[in-house]
Image (spheres, rainbow, N blue to C red):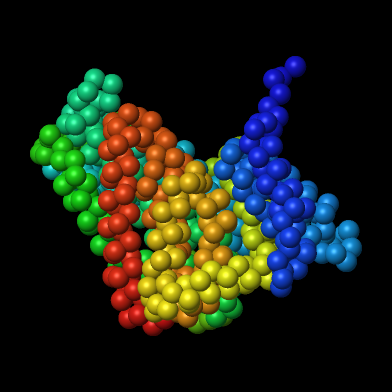
Amino acid sequence: MNKLTPLKLIPSLIAITISLIIWFLIPIPNGVNSNAWHLLALFVGTIAAIIGKALPIGAVSVIAISLVALTGVTNSGSIKGSISDALSGFSNDLIWLIGISIMISVSLNKTGLGSRIGYYIISLFGKKTLGIAYSIAFAETILAPVTPSNTARGGGIIHPIMRSISDSFNSKAEDGTSGRIGRYLSLVNYNINPITSAMFITATAPNPLIVSLIVNETSQNNILTWGMWAVAAFIPALVSLILTPLVIYFLYKPEITATPNAPNFARECINKLGPISTPEKITLCVFVLLLFMWIGIPEMIFGPSFSINATTAAFIGLSVLLATGVINWNDVLKNKGAWDTIIWFSALVMMAGFLGQLGLIKWMSLRVGSIINDMGIHWFYGMLILVLIYVYSHYFFASTTAHITAMFAAFFAAGLSIGAPPMFLGLILAFSSSLMMCLTHYGTGTAPIIFGSGYTTLGEWWKTGLVMSIVNLIIWFFVGGVWWKFLAYW
């Protein structure tokens, strides 16, 4: 008999206890619907279970869906209505956009195209250590639009390339030589990842959730398309990408600053990959096609009737890869990350959505907003306070998804209540949701992979994360704010 892997006892008891206390012991505040309060109990318990890793996030989400359907907290009318509500997250097209995009990104590793792109860029710009750092940033940026898993991108594609470069200069974690070049490149490898995650809706899984939450709290007039998001991120991201290698270079200057052999090493790695294969060419064409559709080129050329929904575009890309055999149906079925994302995303989006519909988010935001209003400060400074609390509370989270689901809607609504422009507030919170990943060695899935390779100490990692969080917030708050004003987003 296989070994059982049940709920972890302590995290499960904590999550259940929290839910029961909110449900039965804490009086329902005036102005709050009882169903909304009971859904909050289930929601907070779910987040606690996710943070405590009582079960994998997908399994916790299945239990949450079951409890929502069983208790009828979203629909007191009928049993059928309750299960329909509990499953409503699966009809969200943005969830499927991320799930299908994760399936598409399998082709990067399967064909070797991801590694080829990384090594090719290093072969062009890798004569200096800074050049290698910027090559890592460039490669991450190229891969970001079509790799919704920032962990797969930064940890699965870029990190092995970074380690190969470090090894070629005899800079290894295990023998005390990481200071030569490995420590610097690993810190760059990680701290570029949150920036590229902020650049595109499809660059990390929780981004579509943010789009949904912004619309839920405002209106369809404030929906962020793939192109709008990318354009909004472009200028502040460009500044961050330029400054990050320089700031880390200042903090932890590598012993080796000139790398004349790196381009040759990269070319050798490319030669080992062999000539570019037909599957790689097809994959590259599919990615170009996806960007063509996501940016909205058909609509620009032929008019609104040729507009292609972003999720529809993703299905077209996956269909081409399946039809040509670049990936097969077993690759899709075995992609646990994609199916897992669809499950937990659907549950969390469903619960967060109904908390908004039942009025709880509005109630919470009014409470927070009134506290800030009582301080008598301008909306800009109030918004700054909200963003700082939102970002630095990530020290207490090991999941960006849990953090966003628990706090984004309430903080966004609180900002609206103090008079912050919806799109300025929404964009800075949206981009901060990725930028905050840099803070810790557990802040996102990429962190333990790169930190675990041993090139840096915990102190070096946290110091760099704190410094980069300050640098990035300044860039995105002020440079971004001016850029978004120029774009007439607010």
9 sits left or right of 298 in the view: right
Which one is in front, 302 or 419? 419
Quadrant in the picture for residue 159: top left
**Residue 464 location, x and y as percent?**
28, 45
20 sits left or right of 348 in the view: right
Quadrant in the picture for residue 435: bottom left
**Residue 401 location, x and y as percent?**
54, 51
Query: Up-down: is 48 above or below 175?
Result: below
Which one is in front, 153 or 365? 365
Q: Residue at x 47, y 38 (%)?
A: 110
Q: Residue at x 67, y 43 (%)?
A: 15
- Judge whether residue 310 can be spotted in this image: no
Which one is in front, 7 or 242? 7
Which of the image's four quarters has the N terminus? top right
Which of the image's four quarters has the C terminus? bottom left
Query: Up-down: is 125 above or below 486?
Result: above
Query: Up-down: is 250 above or below 10?
Result: below
Q: How many marks?
A: 0
**Residue 182 location, x and y as percent?**
24, 33
Q: Residue at x 37, y 73 (%)?
A: 381
432 sits left or right of 265 in the view: right
**Residue 438 location, x and y as percent?**
36, 48
- Judge whether residue 246 can be spotted in this image: yes
